[in-house]
Image: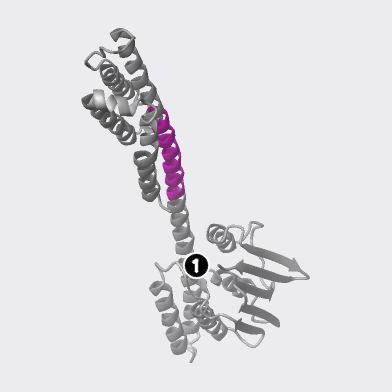
C-alpha cells in the first residue's frame, strides 16, 4: 500500500469516525436545537482545523526550523478557537446557572475538542512525516545503488574491450587465418553488450551464450598447451540475472590461467536449478599479479553483487596447490 492510499484512508477515518465521536462528547442534541449556527461553525472549524494541520505539516516545518511560520499558524488557530469559545449566544432563561457559567462551559468544551483534534492531527502528521522520511531515505539509497551499479557495469566494458582488442591485435600481427572469424565473434559480443546496456536483468540463457562466445573468442588465440572446458546445465533457461555479472570471473581465468609453453586447463561451469545459479571456475596460476591487492574486476563484481543480492549470494575464491578456484552461488527470486 502506497503513501497516498494510507493518507486517504486516514483522512476518511478522521472525517467519518474520529470527528463524529468527538462531537458526541458535547451536548449535541440540546445545542443543535438552541444554537444551530454555533454548532455549524464549530463543526466546520474542527474539520478545517484537521486539514490545516495536514496541509501545514508542522513536524516538517519543525525539522526545517521554520519556527516563525509555526508560531504564526498556532497563534492564528488559538485566536480563532478563543473567538469561537466566546461566540455570542442567546441566554438560557430557564437555566439555574448564570450566563457567565454557560459561556465558560462552552469555552471549555471548545478548547477540549480543539485539543483532541490537535493531538490526533499532530500524531498522524508526525507518523506521516516519519514515513515520508523513510521513503525519501529509501529513494536516495536506491538512486545511490543504481549509480554505483552503473559505475561498476561501465568498468566491466572497457576491461573486456581491452582484453579482446589485445587478442585481435595479436592475431593480426601473426596474420592468422582465424582473424576474420574472431572479428565476427567480437562484433557479436559487442552487439550483446550494448543491446543490454540499460537492461536490469536478462534470461540466463542469453548470458551463458554470451560467455560461450567469449570463451570461443579467447580459445582462438590459444595454442595446444591450454585446454578450455566450458559446461552449462540450465534447469531454468528463463531465470533472470543481471547482464555481465559472471564475465569478470571468466576474464580473470583467461588472464592468469593461460600459457603458451606449459600445459594448463581452464574449467568453467554454469548451472541453474531451483531458483539458484551456481558458477564455478578453476584455472592454474600461470601468471602472477604484480601486487598483492585483490583484482579490481573481482572486487567490483563483489560490490555489484552486494547491491544486487544483499545476503543472497556466496562468493568464495581460493588458491590451493597453484590452482585458483571461484565459486559463486546466487539465490534468485
Q: Is residue 128 magenta?
A: yes
Q: Which residue is mark 1?
A: 159
> Quarter of the image containing the C terminus?
bottom right
- Name the residue rendered at 42%, 69% in the picture: 199
Q: Is residue 120 magenta?
A: yes
Side of 283 where 2 appears, left or right? left
Query: In the orientation shown, which residue stands out farthest toward the bottom?
Result: 177
* SS assignment for the magenta stretch, majority: helix
- Name the residue rendered at 44%, 46% in the picture: 135
On screen, residue 227 above or below 11:
below
Side of 240 where 260 appears, left or right? right
Choose between 265 and 127: the one closer to the eye.
127
- Name the residue rendered at 45%, 63% in the picture: 154
Choose between 175 and 82: the one closer to the eye.
82
Percent x, y of residue 320? 77, 68
Choose between 257 and 41: the one closer to the eye.
41
On screen, residue 196 above or below 6:
below
- Name the residue rendered at 64%, 81% in the picture: 260
Percent x, y of residue 127? 45, 38
- The chosen color scheme is one colour
Percent x, y of residue 227? 66, 85
Choose between 59 and 26: the one closer to the eye.
26
Secondary structure under the numbered disc 1 in the rendered image: helix
Instruction: Classify residue 116 by image quadrant.
Output: top left
On screen, residue 274 above or below 86:
below
Number of numbered markers: 1
Percent x, y of residue 92? 26, 14
Instruction: Classify residue 109 by image quadrant.
Output: top left
Residue density around tag 1, few if under 14, some if 14–19, many if 20 or more, within 10 Å: few
Q: Which residues are magenta?
A: 118-140
Instruction: Classify residue 265 by image quadrant.
Output: bottom right
Amino acid at each position: 500500500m502506497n503513501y497516498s492510499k494510507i493518507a486517504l484512508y486516514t483522512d476518511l477515518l478522521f472525517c467519518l469516525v474520529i470527528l463524529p465521536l468527538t462531537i458526541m462528547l458535547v451536548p449535541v442534541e440540546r445545542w443543535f436545537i438552541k444554537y444551530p449556527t454555533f454548532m455549524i461553525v464549530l463543526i466546520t472549524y474542527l474539520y478545517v482545523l484537521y486539514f490545516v494541520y495536514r496541509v501545514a505539516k508542522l513536524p516538517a516545518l519543525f525539522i526545517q526550523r521554520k519556527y516563525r511560520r509555526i508560531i504564526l499558524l498556532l497563534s492564528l488557530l488559538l485566536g480563532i478557537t478563543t473567538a469561537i469559545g466566546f461566540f455570542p449566544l442567546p441566554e438560557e432563561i430557564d437555566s439555574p446557572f448564570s450566563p457567565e457559567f454557560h459561556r465558560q462551559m462552552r469555552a471549555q468544551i471548545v478548547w477540549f475538542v480543539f485539543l483532541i483534534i490537535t493531538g490526533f492531527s499532530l500524531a498522524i502528521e508526525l507518523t506521516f512525516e516519519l514515513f515520508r522520511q523513510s521513503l525519501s531515505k529509501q529513494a536516495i539509497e536506491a538512486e545511490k545503488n543504481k549509480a554505483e551499479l552503473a559505475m561498476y557495469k561501465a568498468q566491466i566494458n572497457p576491461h573486456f574491450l581491452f582484453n579482446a582488442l589485445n587478442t585481435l591485435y595479436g592475431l593480426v600481427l601473426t596474420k592468422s587465418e582465424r582473424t576474420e572469424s574472431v572479428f565476427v565473434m567480437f562484433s557479436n559480443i559487442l552487439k550483446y553488450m550494448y543491446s543490454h546496456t540499460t537492461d536490469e536483468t536478462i534470461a540466463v540463457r542469453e548470458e551463458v551464450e554470451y560467455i560461450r562466445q567469449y570463451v570461443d573468442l579467447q580459445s582462438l588465440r590459444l595454442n595446444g598447451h591450454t585446454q578450455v572446458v566450458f559446461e552449462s546445465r540450465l534447469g531454468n533457461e528463463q531465470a533472470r540475472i543481471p547482464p555481465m555479472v559472471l564475465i569478470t570471473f571468466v576474464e580473470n581465468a583467461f588472464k592468469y590461467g593461460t600459457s603458451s609453453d606449459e600445459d594448463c586447463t581452464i574449467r568453467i561451469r554454469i548451472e541453474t536449478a531451483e531458483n539458484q545459479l551456481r558458477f564455478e571456475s578453476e584455472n592454474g596460476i600461470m601468471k602472477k599479479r604484480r601486487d598483492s591487492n585483490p583484482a579490481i574486476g573481482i572486487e567490483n563484481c563483489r560490490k555489484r553483487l552486494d547491491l544486487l543480492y544483499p545476503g543472497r549470494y556466496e562468493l568464495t575464491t581460493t588458491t590451493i596447490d597453484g590452482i585458483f578456484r571461484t565459486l559463486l552461488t546466487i539465490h534468485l527470486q
